[in-house]
Image (cartoon, rainbow, N blue to C red):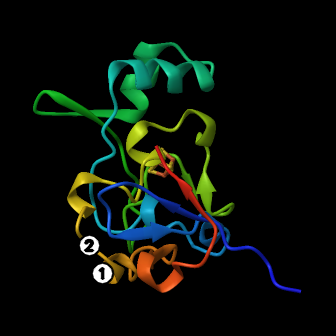
Amino acid sequence: MSSTLTLLHKAGFRFAFDPDSCKECPGNCCRGVSGYVWVTDTEIRNLANFLKMNTIDFRQRYVRKIDNRYSLKESWTGTDYPCIFFDAEARGCSVYQARPKQCRTYPFWEENRGLTGDLTHDCPGIRNSSDFSGDKAQHHR
Ligand code: SF4
């Protein structure tokens, strides 16, 4: 019996994304080299609400200011820099339902527009669209 592969596509991007790959991935998009997970004031409020914290405490504990923007903090494990909300044991996001737009839209980021399988070393869910032209596809917004 064959299983159905569901790939997400977005107009203007040359790759597709298989969300089922996240189940086997160690969390590559939430850890690795140091980086930024940008958050807006609204997203900070949503995350604070999700954790039943007040916004001031949430900012002090989980947010850092970079110039005039805000990013979630990251940890240092000795080998890499996971997002402060990455749960290494569960291999997933501990605030998944309230995660910011940057996380919801990965890997369809402006900077990735035009790439094909080049992302594969980071994300096992990236597929070249042309390799799977016969599969069921959904559109990602
Ligand atoms: S908020 Fe969640 S999905 Fe986003 S980088 Fe952090 S752990 Fe990953």
Picture coordinates of residue 72 (x, y %)?
36, 39
Picture coordinates of residue 32 (x, y %)?
37, 68
- The one of 45 and 14 positioned closer to us in this rendering: 14
- The residue most toward the front is 134
Figure disc tally:
2
Q: CA distance from mark 2 to mark 1?
A: 6 Å
Q: Residue at x 26, y 72 (%)?
A: 115
Where 89 falls versus 97 (above or below)?
below
Picture disc at residue 3: none
Picture disc at residue 118: 1
- The one of 3 and 100 positioned closer to us in this rendering: 3
- The one of 94 and 135 positioned closer to us in this rendering: 135
Disc 1: residue Cβ within 8 A of ligand 1's nearest atom: no
Assess whether mark 1 and mark 2 are in contact (beta carbons under 8 angstroms). yes
Picture coordinates of residue 94 (x, y %)?
61, 45
Q: Does 99 sit left or right of 88 as displayed?
A: left
Whether residue 118 is visible here, answered yes or no, is yes
**Badge 1 element:** helix
Q: Does 1 sit left or right of 83 as displayed?
A: right
What residue would you read off at disc 2? 115
Quadrant of the image occupied by residue 55: top left
Q: Residue at x 34, y 76 (%)?
A: 119
Where 127 falls versus 113 (above or below)?
below
- The residue most toward the left is 67
Residue type marked 1:
Asp
Residue type marked 2:
Leu
Where 134 falls versus 90 (above or below)?
below
- The residue most toward the right is 1
Quadrant for the N terminus in the image: bottom right
Q: Residue at x 38, y 71 (%)?
A: 15
